[in-house]
Amino acid sequence: MARTTARVEDLKAGTLPPICAKTGGAADGFTSIAFYSTPGWTWILLLFGILPFLIARAFSTTRVVGFVPMSEVSLRRGRAFTWTYLGSFLVGALLLALGFVTVPRVAELGVGVLAAAVVFTCVGWLFVWPTGHLHGEWVDLSFVDSRFARALDRWYGAR
């Protein structure tokens, strides 16, 4: 997987080169992905408790939604991944709630399913969707195909 950068205005407008960000093939459409930036100073607030930290992060986070080109295969894979992790969270929560009402062993199973869902989501996200971090007017894109990264670098070099 490669890394590259894109301008925020190009991501918002969906005017990136029509090459799939995950497969490097021809893009059939776009998917909207949110990119965030939070100042580093918010971490010091953990010394004063979780609540001040969460409040500061909520109010200081900058969010940009951009349109990233994707192929139909990548979009289908992304939808299947999304339904899978949402379903596993739902099953885990239901087992946990059912365990509180009935047998405690079911609650333990629910906690296990929720833990597995968290790991699956965190690891799987990197392979299914491009990620990125907002830096002013640019977004650093990670976990993209090298052909997409080269095309984007050439595209900005020509501009």
Image (cartoon, grey):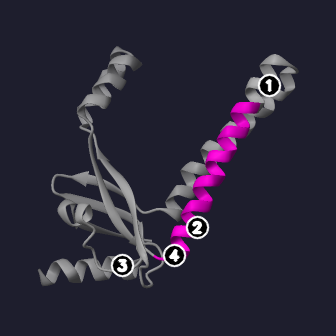
Q: Marks 4 and 1: CB-CB under 8 Å?
A: no
The magenta segment:
71-94
* Residue 75 belongs to the span the image colors magenta: yes
Relative image position of residue 52 (x, y in whole percent): 32, 18
Per the image, the residue denoted by label 1 is 98
* Residue drawn at the location 21% of the way across and 60% of the way down: 8
Per the image, the residue denoted by label 3 is 148
* Residue drawn at the location 14% of the way across and 84% of the way down: 158
- Kind of residue at badge 3: Phe
Label 4 CA crowd tier, 10 Å (few <14, some 14–19, many 20+): some
**Which is nearer the N-term, disc 4 or disc 1?**
4
Q: Nearer the viewer, mark 3 or mark 2?
A: 2
Q: On the picture, is 151 further left or further right than 94?
A: left
- Kind of residue at badge 1: Leu
Name the quadrant containing residue 47: top left
Residue 36 versus residue 137 in the image, above or below: above
Q: Secondary structure at mark 4?
A: helix
Relative image position of residue 16 (x, y in whole percent): 27, 74
Q: Nearer the viewer, mark 2 or mark 4?
A: 4
CA–CA distance between discs 2 and 4? 9 Å
Res 77 label: 2
Q: Secondary structure at mark 1?
A: helix
**Which is nearer the N-term, disc 3 or disc 2?**
2
Per the image, the residue denoted by label 4 is 72
